[in-house]
Image (spheres, rainbow, N blue to C red):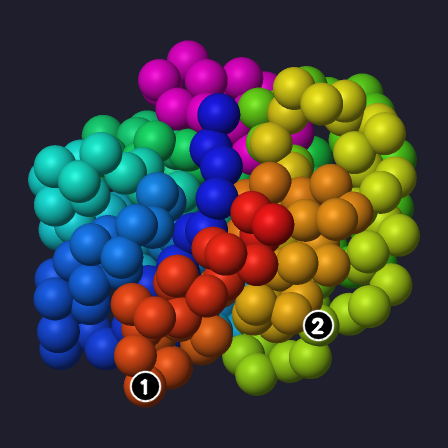
Amino acid sequence: MLKGLAPSILAADFGRLSDQVQLVLDAGAPVIHVDVMDGHFVPPITMGPLAVDAIKAQVEAAGAKIDVHLMIERPERQIEAFAKAGADSITIHAESTPHLHYTLQAINDAGCLSGLALNPGTPAEAVSELAPDMVLCMTVNPGWGGQRFLEHSLSKLVRLRTLIGPGTALEVDGGIDAETAAKCAAAGATVFVAGTAVFGAQDPAAAVQTITTAITR
């Protein structure tokens, strides 16, 4: 099961990606988060399996995990490629395909932990017929950077924790910093994606430590 802070390399300096990843790994980040966008499910286009492959050995050497978040249409078509590239977990969106159960099963069959993401407008109850290894509660609308944390996400986290029980990881993504991460932890979250709050900080390593302290109090 994934747990702890997951810095998102979407906010990293790609000209120094290896150095940036190593910086947060050395600071104790147990998970590296990879945001994949296709220009259809969400407006931006970001990275693909090559980015996962590029950091896999480095992350593995540190004893950390790669968490891939597919913000793409028809994610079932891409599971094999990301699994082969080195993903440890792959999260798909409940809104992205009519074949949710099939795709979550395909993720597990490929040797990865399965995750199910819910947009802010998708009710918590959407997870009730499924059994992913992790549920991701989007705390902003996916695809647009710089958004403010949606405070009503906290009550949704509480509902999700009740629905999925204590044995399933509960991830949050969007507007996460030390303050909002602490609130989410109190509401039941166990995995915390932070991009700008880490890589946009003057000292990313210190930011990792500050957020980690906030979620472990």
Q: 60 and 69: which one is in front?
A: 60
Q: Earlier in the sequence, mark 1 or mark 2?
A: 2
Query: Where's residue 77, x and y in %?
Result: 43, 36
Is the residue 147 above or below the residue 84 in the image? below
104 sits left or right of 139 in the view: left
Q: Is 103 a magenta residue? A: yes
What crowding class fits label 2: few (fewer than 14 Cα within 10 Å), some (14-19), or many (20 or more)?
A: some
Which label belongs to residue 202? 1
For badge 1, the amino acid type reads Gln
Query: Where's residue 110, x and y in %?
Result: 36, 19
Q: Residue at x 88, y 52 (%)?
A: 155
Which label belongs to residue 149? 2
39 sits left or right of 165 in the view: left
18 sits left or right of 183 in the view: left
| Residue range (magenta) | 100-116
Q: Residue at x 47, y 33 (%)?
A: 2
